[in-house]
Image (tube, coloured by chain):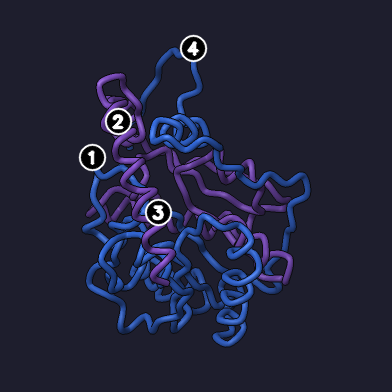
Amino acid sequence: MTQTKKRTSFRTFLSYMDLSREYYAAYGYSQPYKWMSYTEVPFARLAKPLSQCRVGLLTTTDLEKLPGENKMDRYLLRKVYAHPVEDAPEHFYTQDLQWDQETTHTDDNESFMPLNSLAETATSGKIGSAAPRFYGAMTDYSQGKTSKKSAPQVLDFCRQDGVEALILPAL
Amino acid sequence: MSLIARHLEENGIPTVVIGSARDIVEECGVARFLFTDFPLGNPCGKPWDKEMQGAIMEMALDLLQGAWQPRTTVQAPFVWSEDDTWRTVFMHVSEEKREAFKKAGEGRRAAQANAKTRH
């Protein structure tokens, strides 16, 4: 583990709300995106020890490149999905999403969709089991669509698979 | 992602979000958040660093069972690099890029309008 120590006059972590506001303004969008901000936060506890729980994973990436001439066409075709872990893609499709393509890459699935790491914790006994399917819900501009369509669909998938806790890595 | 996590929590399924956009997740408000201070793209550990990825998974699971109240954020004790240049790259609007961004935006809006007429 690399230890670092420094003095700073600014917060160290980046504000993506600030960055994206300036970025899209430079692109000529007149209205900044309005992010959701809640006062109340729901909280559920594990119903039993983690070592007895089935745990699932949800990714913001896609299984493959959807058909369509451009990103906008593909964006309109995206759907929430459930897919067997044993048939996971060799490479998830990430090119339509916003991430730092100048600094890093997504060639290693485990760096953003850790199916193997989760499976290893089932083998070690830390969790009861890993879900037989994983889920995908691509980041959507529409908060209404995410809350009213995508989220209930993911909940249905979890119930179908007996998932008792979910890990959500956001690309 | 945060909105989906909230919906699951409301319906009795505990969640942990792993991500690198700390302000967006915390502003929305989630039950449990494991923050990795990395460039967007590898929230679960550096590519090919199996040891780090395993450690982050362990931390996420510890958070899942250890948090006793919502808005619990844990920061993974890893740094991307000693050089912080990456913090000045992604989405950075420099003066020399401004004109190119404006043109790209015009192209994007035309593509959006075009796609909507076809779907």
Look at 30% across and 30% down and name the residue there. B89
The 10 Å Cα crowd at callout 3, few under 14, some 14 to 19, many 20 or more, is many
The tint of chain B in the picture is: purple
Residue picked out by circle 2? B89
Is residue B82 visible in the rendered structure shown here?
A: no
Query: Hey, what amino acid is under mark 4?
Result: Ser
Question: To which chain does the residue with label 4 belong?
Answer: A
What label does residue A171 carry, if any?
A: 3
Look at 47% across and 49% down and name the residue there. B19
Query: Hey, what amino acid is under mark 1?
Result: Glu
The quadrant of the picture occupied by the C terminus of chain B is: bottom left
Colour blue belongs to chain: A
Question: To which chain does the residue with label 2 belong?
Answer: B
Residue picked out by circle 1? A102
**Label 1 secondary element:** loop
Asked whether the residues under marks 3 and 4 belong to the same chain, the reply is: yes
